[in-house]
């Protein structure tokens, strides 16, 4: 979405058009090959050097990748840990945005409700980035697409299957980011744990323009058959610990083990955003096996997010990145 002026935000996967998504991924390839070649936050590059990275939820990869990435680009990450800010309880999101925009180059927020991110962006004249919310995990998907492209040489036309809890943020982002890249996205989960109708409709609309496609099914075999990419996520996310026993039973037919991978293409690759629980959503023989690209995927959070921040700052007129269109 875009708030007043030219500032660009990244709150959900479809905030980038297909061509813009490709620009970010191309920039990520370039920055991975030369990690310090793009310096939008360095002394000569930007009016502000600090990026606020706010956590309402704990994290490992998000914290490290954004912290390291901002530093790599010549800036200073300001990490605000869970409970250290007053956003949404003592101070409104709107007021917080109006304060932060005067002090930092960008705002990265890992939170719960997507509506809070929307409010932050509508009141901010600097880019706001969704580092995870209950509905979407778009930064993770940029890393995933970068990793698939590295291993497969392309994205458009590939088939990507996601199995498990398909009513969560990862399933939503796989759908939206995948079809934006022109992929055929198949989502499989039990009844009652599938993507919301609005998300599916948006994905189908994008797919109609990019040549991708959408399949939502309760049949894991239908999703897996001939897939080039197989992905899953933990069955028990933060805040769902009390449901663990029920979820283990509910999702057991959607576990990604050797038999499941055998139904995909012979050269299929496996993705998991981590943390992973071996023996539940994925077998150790898969995540630790030759088809797994999860460690490249984890590293690529750094490169994809650096590229995203640089692209947003450039497109918002707050920095200049050589090689990007104005």
Image (cartoon, rainbow, N blue to C red):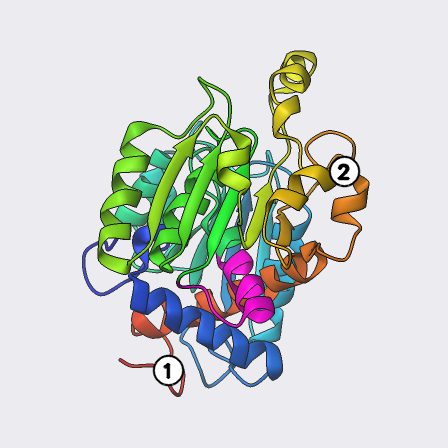
Q: Is residue 86 visible?
A: no
Say whether residue 246 is left or right of residue 100: right
Query: Where residue 197 appears, x then y in whole percent?
Result: 29, 29
Give the residues drawn in magenta, as a range: 142-156
> Which is nearer the eye, 228 or 193?
228
Q: Residue at x 40, y 63 (%)?
A: 156
Say whether residue 162 is left or right of residue 1: right
> Which is nearer the eye, 62 or 194?
194
Task: State whether residue 276 is above or below residue 211.
Answer: above
Question: What residue would you read off at disc 1?
Answer: 320
Say whether residue 133 is left or right of residue 34: left
Instruction: List the single residue furthest toward the left.
Output: 4
Task: Please tell me whether the stretch drawn in magenta is mainly helix, strand or loop.
Answer: helix
Query: Where residue 166 appears, x then y in whole percent?
Result: 49, 31
Q: Residue at x 36, y 56 (%)?
A: 101
Question: What residue would you read off at disc 2?
Answer: 283
Secondary element at tag 2: loop
Q: Residues within 10 Å of mark 2 (few under 14, many from 20)?
A: some
Query: Where residue 265 appears, x then y in whole percent?
Result: 59, 53
Residue 78 lies in the magenta stretch: no
Secondary element at tag 1: loop
């Amino acid at each position: 979405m875009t708030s007043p002026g030219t500032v660009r935000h990244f709150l959900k996967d479809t905030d980038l058009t297909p061509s813009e998504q490709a620009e970010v991924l191309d920039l990520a390839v370039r920055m991975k090959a030369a990690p310090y070649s793009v310096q939008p936050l360095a002394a000569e590059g930007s009016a502000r050097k600090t990026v606020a990275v706010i956590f309402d939820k704990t994290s490992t990869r998000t914290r490290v990748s954004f912290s390291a990435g901002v530093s790599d680009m010549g800036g200073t990450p300001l990490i605000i840990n869970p409970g250290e800010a007053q956003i949404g309880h003592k101070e409104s999101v709107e007021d917080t945005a109006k304060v932060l925009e005067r002090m930092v180059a960008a705002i990265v927020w890992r939170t719960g409700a997507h509506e809070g991110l929307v409010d932050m962006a509508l009141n901010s004249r600097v880019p706001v980035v969704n580092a995870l919310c209950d509905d979407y995990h778009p930064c993770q998907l940029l890393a995933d697409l970068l990793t698939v492209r590295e291993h497969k040489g392309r994205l458009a036309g590939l088939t990507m299957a996601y199995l498990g809890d398909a009513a969560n943020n990862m399933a939503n982002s796989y759908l939206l980011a995948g079809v934006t890249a022109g992929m055929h996205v198949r989502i499989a989960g039990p009844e009652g744990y599938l993507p919301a109708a609005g998300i599916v409709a948006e994905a189908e609309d994008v797919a109609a323009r990019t040549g991708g496609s959408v399949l939502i099914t309760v049949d894991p075999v239908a999703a897996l058959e001939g897939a080039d990419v197989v992905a899953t996520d933990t069955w028990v996310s933060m805040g769902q610990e009390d449901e663990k026993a029920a979820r283990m039973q509910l999702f057991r037919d959607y576990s990604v083990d050797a038999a499941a991978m055998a139904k995909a293409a012979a050269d299929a690759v496996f993705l998991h955003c981590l943390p992973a629980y071996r023996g539940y959503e994925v077998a150790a023989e898969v995540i630790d096996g030759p088809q797994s690209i999860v460690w490249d995927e984890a590293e690529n959070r750094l490169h994809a997010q650096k590229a995203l921040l640089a692209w947003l700052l450039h497109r918002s007129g707050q920095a200049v990145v050589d090689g990007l269109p104005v």
